[in-house]
Image: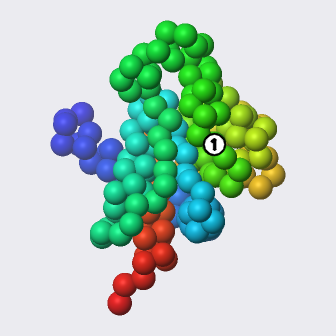
């Protein structure tokens, strides 16, 4: 297979997943955006987490909320649970990797906040444990996953929301999670700051 053909195959695979997701997930993405809007309007914050490469999507969500998405507007309160710098180094040194976000989540989470958890494989222990922690504290959860949702569904409370990409390949799930982040941020911005 040539590189040119491989690129075409990647596009084709990605487009097919997007088409499938568009018919399966529109209502869930709308519901997720509405939950974020309600959380923000109530004066609460968004907490985001992801481990491995999904951390980048969590980071991108927080950047869009804190700074801007489409246009200049006030910042929205949001926090990224992360492993950067001395904080991350200290936590990794002192804690089991499966509970890496526990201290951060406990320190920042308040009633009314909302956790957006990115788990493309559905087996990421650090994210699963953070979801369990949120459920225990009665903090709402929106989980972005791939097709493997058994462990995530087992952690979520009845009112929580799972947005599951119809794919198992991590790279396709990650790119679709980024699409959902962008779609949600566009819905949030244009709902809270409508433009003519």
Can residue 97 be seen? yes
State the image quarter where residue 196 is shown: bottom left
Residue placed most toward the observer, 182 or 150: 182
**Mark 1 neighbour density, 10 Å: few (under 14) some (14–19) many (20 or more):** many
Residue 12 spot, x, y in % from top left? 36, 52
Q: Which residue is at a point 43% across and 51% down the rendered structure image?
A: 61
Task: Give the quarter of the figure containing the N terminus.
Answer: top left
Residue 94 spot, x, y in % from top left? 55, 10
**Residue 187 relative to residue 10: left or right:** right
Residue placed most toward the observer, 24 or 126: 126
Count the marks: 1
Q: Which residue is at a point 35% across and 69% down the rendered structure image?
A: 73
Q: Which residue is at a point 66% across and 46% down the rendered structure image?
A: 110
* Vertical comparison of 98 with 164: above or below: above
* Vertical comparison of 185 with 60: above or below: below
Residue placed most toward the observer, 45 or 20: 45
Instruction: Identify the image's colour scheme: rainbow, by chain, secondary structure or one colour.
Output: rainbow
Q: Which residue is at a point 44% across and 63% down the rendered structure image?
A: 185
For disc 1, the marked residue is 109
Q: Secondary structure at mark 1?
A: loop
Q: Residue furthest right?
A: 158
Residue placed most toward the observer, 177 or 50: 50
State the image quarter where residue 15 is shown: bottom left
Residue 83 spot, x, y in % from top left? 44, 26
Residue 8 spot, x, y in % from top left? 27, 48
**Residue 176 relative to residue 165: left or right:** left
């Amino acid at each position: 297979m040539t590189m040119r053909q491989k690129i075409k195959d990647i596009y084709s695979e990605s487009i097919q997943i997007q088409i499938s997701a568009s018919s399966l997930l529109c209502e869930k993405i709308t519901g997720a955006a509405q939950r974020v809007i309600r959380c923000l309007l109530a004066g609460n914050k968004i907490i985001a987490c992801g481990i491995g490469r999904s951390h980048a999507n969590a980071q991108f969500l927080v950047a869009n909320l804190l700074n801007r998405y489409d246009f200049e507007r006030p910042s929205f309160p949001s926090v990224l649970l992360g492993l950067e710098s001395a904080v991350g180094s200290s936590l990794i040194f002192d804690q089991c990797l499966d509970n890496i976000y526990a201290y951060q989540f406990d320190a920042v989470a308040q009633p009314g906040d909302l956790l957006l958890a990115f788990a493309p494989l559905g087996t990421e222990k650090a994210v699963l444990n953070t979801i369990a922690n949120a459920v225990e504290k009665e903090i709402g959860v929106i989980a972005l996953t791939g097709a493997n949702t058994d462990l995530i569904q087992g952690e979520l409370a009845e009112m929580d929301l799972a947005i599951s990409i119809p794919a198992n390949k991590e790279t396709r799930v990650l790119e679709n999670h980024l699409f959902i982040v962008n779609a949600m941020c566009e819905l949030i911005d244009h709902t809270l700051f409508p433009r003519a």
